[in-house]
Amino acid sequence: MAIKTKLLIAFTFIIGFFFNASPANSVDEDGVIKIHLSYKIILNPKNLARPNPYSQPGESVTDAMIEEAVAEMNALLASYWRGYRFEVDEILEIGALGGFAPDPGHWFDVDFVEVDKKHELINEMITTLINHPQPYAWRENAINIYINQATSGAKWRIKKFKDVIVMGADSVSAGWLLLHEIGHYFDLRHTHGDLGIALPNQILGQKIPGDDKVDDTINDLANWDRDDIAAYNFTGKYDQLQPRQKKQVDDVAENIMSYHFLKPIKAIPKCLTEGQLDRWADTTLDFYRQQVRDGRTWFVDRQTPGHEGTSTYPFDSVNLAIAAANSNGGDIILLRPGAFNEAVTISKPVTIRATRKGPASIGTSIMLAEISTE
Ligand SMILES: [Zn+2]
């Protein structure tokens, strides 16, 4: 049973500070939105052993490697201050001795990245799991992650409204890489454009930056270094840019959805921008994807008012968002920067957050000066 809280708030939020009005026994104790993951480890059809990471000879993929990746992803999500977290529902072993199609073991030794550039094999795998759901344990209410032996890295693919992510044994503990694929799941494109599908000769051949459908990521190409990004988007070299411009270059150079983990930058990907996180939040409302998370984000913005509470059509009042939020708890109200001059009474468990972009004030028309997040 949810305890109802009643409080009047009339104070100012600062960047990164959030107010948690959830009582301890509500549906969501932590004031976060959980995204559910279902891991499936494809066993070696010769001996039913788990796959071996080449980087750790003789050692099989362990549950601890998966937990390491999820902890890394959750630390990244925590740094974005949007209140999303991953939760592992299950780690299953699938596949039978012999591994003859349609058994999942059929895919144990397939490199879905290097030998499946046209995606024919992964499409065939998805068709197979649609026709034989039981051995593949595909879930409607979780993101489905399959681990096999041979895949070089990871890949996301959707076909007939069924999404899969396939990862090789070597990549199981790479949280940032899985977050990249889950970014595609939530409709994020590469910072150099396109929807997560490497086009033929993309890295070498792409000469013009593509559109990633996000406003606050500057133009990018996979083989650019920081000076190339700076020269195309601004004038001058990276070192000569203003701090704000350098941050925009870094946001792309270290972006989870970029290819800059490769040469020449070889970055450790860690950034998602506010625009990318907005797109992510709106995609969680999709008919199929809403089943993999609990709770939702309601956006409030005085500058671009709408009436849906989405990032694109946000409410223009905190009270509208509170009225829309789930009475049983678990939802997040996200205040864009601005002064929301209204008396607010909260009588349901809900979490209110501000964004990294700037402060939000409730109950006053006075706006705090913007504080740098550096
Ligand atoms: Zn990708």
Image (cartoon, rainbow, N blue to C red):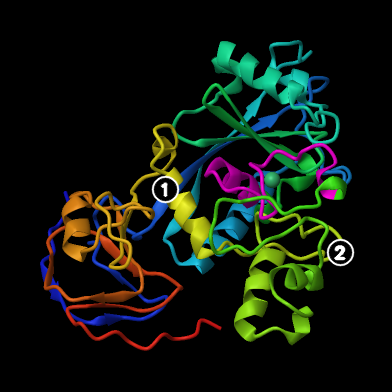
Q: Position of residue 374 (x, y in %)?
A: 56, 83
Q: Residue at x 64, y 29 (%)?
A: 93
Quadrant in the picture for residue 170: top right
Magenta stretch holds residue 181: yes
Q: Earlier in the sequence, mark 1 or mark 2?
A: 2
Q: Residue at x 45, y 56 (%)?
A: 278
Query: Looking at the image, is 157 positioned above or below residue 256?
Result: above
Q: What's the mark number on residue 247? A: none
Q: Residue at x 25, y 58 (%)?
A: 315
Q: Position of residue 219 (x, y in %)?
A: 68, 61
Q: Position of residue 319 (x, y in %)?
A: 16, 62
* Amino acid of disc 2: Pro
Query: Looking at the image, is 305 positioned above or below residue 163?
Result: below
Q: Which residue is mark 1?
A: 282
Count of marks placed on residues: 2
Q: Which residues are magenta?
A: 179-203
- Separation (CA) of disc 1 from disc 2: 33 Å
| Mark 1 nearby-residue class (10 Å; few <14, some 14–19, many ≥20) | many
Q: Which secondary structure class fits the magenta region best? A: loop
Q: Which residue is mark 2?
A: 264
Describe residue 238's horizontal placement relative to residue 77 as left or right: right
For mark 1, give the secondary structure: helix
Q: Position of residue 46 (x, y in %)?
A: 83, 20
Describe residue 148's horizontal placement relative to residue 9 as left or right: right
